[in-house]
Every structure is written in C-alpha cells, then in structure tokens.
Amino acid sequence: MKTLVIIDDEPVIRGMLARHLELQGWRVLEAENGDRGLELITAHRPDAVLCDLLMPGTNGFKVCRTIRSRRAELGDITVIITTGSSFPADRKSALEAGANHYLLKPVSPRDVIAILENQRPLTDAEPAAPAPPAVPTNGADEVRIRFWGVRGSIASPGPATVRYGGNTSCVEVRCGGEIIVLDAGTGIRALGESLRKEFAGRPIKTTLLLSHTHWDHIQGLPFFRPAYDQGNSVTVLGYEGAQQSLLKTLSAQMDSAFFPVSLDRLTGSLTVRELKELEFQVGRIPVQATFTNHPGITLAYRLCTPCGGVVYMPDTEILPFPRSPSASSELKDPPASEEFSDYKNQLLAEFAQDADIFICDAQYTAADYESHRGWGHSCIDDTVAMAIRAKVKRLLLFHHDPTRDDAGVDEMVAHARALVEAQGANLRVDAAAEGLEILLTRKSRLLNRG
C-alpha cells in the first residue's frame, strides 16, 4: 500500500482529502504543521506529500527544501503544494524549492488522485486566518501610534509628496512601555534619529515586526542607528522567506556588493528571530498574525491592547480576489472560485473585526487596478468594503502608490469617504501621513495630533 502524508493546519481540509484518498487505497498520515509532517516523512518515507504552503512554523517552502536536501535518505518523493496564493512568484518559488505540483485551493481530491496516478491535474490553492484575540486586561492606559513611512514600492520624496510623505512603510506603536515598530522601510531612519535624541544615551529597547522582506519594507534597517549602539536592544521578528531564512535575507541586502557595513556589525544590539507561531507577545502586549494575499510569505499583525485593537495590513490584495489573471500571468490553471475567494476575504475581515485602527493597503484606484491585477495590492474600493465588512472604527489608507502626489491621495480619501457615505456605514477614513500621531485611550477616544 502506498503512503501519503498530508500537511495542513486546517483539520477539515486534511480530513476531507484523507477520506477520499483512503478510498483509493492510499495509507494516509496527517500532520497539522510542517515540523510534525517532517517527522512523519522521516519515520515512514512516504511515496507522496501533500503540503500547504503557508502555515505557522515550518512552511511549505521549507518542507520542500528539506525533503530535497535529504533525497538520498528519503528517495524521490512526489511533493504537491496546495495554497490559496495564485501569485506567479510563489508558484515559481515553490517549484524551485522542490515541489512537483502546485494546486490552488479549494483542492479537488480527484485532481490529487490524477497527479498521483500520473494524470494531468484538473484544478488548482489558502490557509485559514485565526479569529481575533480577546482584548486583554493588562497593559497601559494609552497607545500612541505614529507614522514614519506610508509610501509603497519605492520611496518618492519631493515637493509633490510633502504633505503625506515619500518614505516607505514604518509605523511606531507605543504601549505599556513597549516600542513596537511595524516594518523597516525608509521611514525607520527618521524614527531611529528621534529615538536617539529622546533617550539621550539611555538604553533603547525596540521590537521590529516585519510583514515581509520586500525591499520597501526592509531597506531602512541598515540606517536605523539605534541598532549600531551598544547597550540598545533591537529584536527583529518575522517569518522565514520563500527562498531563504529571515536572517539571510536581511544579511544579503547588507552584503558588501550593496552596502558598506555588514549585518554582523549590528549584532551587538540586534537579534533576528523567526516566528514559529501566529500568536505571541511583545512584553505584555498580545500580538496575532495572519497570512495575507501578497507574493511570498507576508503577514498582517494585530496588536491587542487594553485601549483597542490595532491592525496593520500593509500589503494584501483584497476583495474581490482573485480576479481574472493579468495577461502577463504565468499561471496556466484557472483561479480559485469566487466563493472561495470571498471566504478568504472573510477570514481577513474576521482578523480585523472591530479594530479601533485598521492600517490597510489601498494602493490603487479602480482604474489603476485594471492593469495591476495579481500584483498583491488592493483597489481602494475593496479596502473600504473590507473595512466596512470588518466593522472597524477607523481606516487609515496605506501604502500610497509612488506615482501618486498629495492631490492624488486627497482624491483617494474623498472617494473612500463617498463610498462609506453611500453605504451608510459608521467608519472614519483618513490617509496615513508621515508625522500623523493617533492616541488611543481606555475610553477608546481617538485624538488626531497630526
């Protein structure tokens, strides 16, 4: 009897596939995460592995690489990746990591059977987002949020972007004595200078949460001066990349070919840790993460503070997603069904449910989006729809397109507010801007100090 290992953090998906495959004569072993899956693979040396791409802990990319690195021991196992990501870059990375096939969820058992029987697969891949955590009772009396970089893709300074700013993603959140930094785009340079001035030689302790390692979210890290000062503590948290570890990716951008100072010059005060779970704590602040619709492994974060929920979702392509593939798409298989896409978006809405602050990707207008489908960023109409669906209190439009000037961002805000008014929703909409500061208190009062 042939053996198959199914690795997926969704028990319903595992159970459904297992039942069908067992009827076809397969011995099926189930694992809820990559680490357990690799244990089963080592112990049983299966003929095939069906593995979800985006999971807490060891993801599908790493499972593939591990299996292929141990080919002499494990043999030539057929590896089928299942995922909700229709991005060509993710498909390419999975195949380069060693996957034989790449199926888009919802996965049909007959397609898996077709592959295992060396037939042509008929369809095509998504992970579930966990529900938002309960509001904790511990923490501080207030939360301060300050924007240091709000631009997407590439920094765009100049006279046309003065009001909203030209630096890329970086948001500072202070709560309960913790300094939490969301992403290390070029905006983190000015944050570092501000912290050094504020602390005046006293030790600085910060925790940097990276959504992902695309350039516009990490390029400022080499210029974050507190990371160079002995006595400071800078902890960088994020998920392993699609092709290599988080540490290797951050080190690569500071290789001598690209930057004069290597990452090891920062190790006196900088620690890089890969997340293994989607729920953790920064000091006394519970944090939850979920995977978003963006090429590679990309996270959104929810900071659960006593003053309300703060959700940071800088890079994601939301409702209605996936839309029809662009003409340049490398995917040859049809996208997942509209119903399943809506289910995926519902998971993101549940993650952001009732948030006091929702910082979300709104890079494109509806016209822009027509030529940027599948790029991993959202149309503003869909961002507003998501915010209304999630019943958030305040939406901050984020990741402004580098070609959009201040007047263009003003138009985006006016359009978003008109959409809210047309829906009769109770939602405040603003555009994130460098220097904007928001204060949340236990009484959930929002004070705009920007």
Image (cartoon, rainbow, N blue to C red):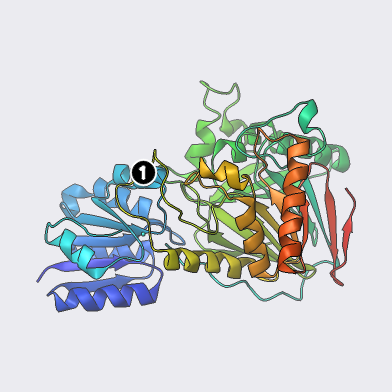
Residue with the most extreme left position: 1
Q: Residue 91: x percent and y percent?
A: 35, 47
The residue at 31%/45% (across/down) is: 97
The residue at 80%/26% (across/down) is: 159
Q: Residue 270: x percent and y percent?
A: 63, 42
In this rendering, would 382 be left or right of 83? Answer: right
Task: Report helix, strand or loop for mark 1.
Answer: helix
How many numbered marks, from 0 up? 1
- Can residue 54 be seen by looking at this rendering? yes
Q: Amino acid at mark 1?
A: Ser
Q: Residue 363: x percent and y percent?
A: 63, 45
The quadrant holding residue 163 is top right
In this rendering, would 272 be left or right of 22? Answer: right
Q: Residue 306: x percent and y percent?
A: 78, 70
Query: Where is 297 relative to 336, above or below?
Result: above
Q: Residues within 10 Å of mark 1 (few under 14, many from 20)?
A: some
- Can residue 284 be seen by looking at this rendering? no
Quadrant assignment for the N terminus: bottom left
In this rendering, would 446 be left or right of 185? Answer: right
The quadrant holding residue 393 is bottom right
- Can you identify the residue that label 1 sits on? 93
Query: Where is 129 relative to 224, above or below?
Result: below
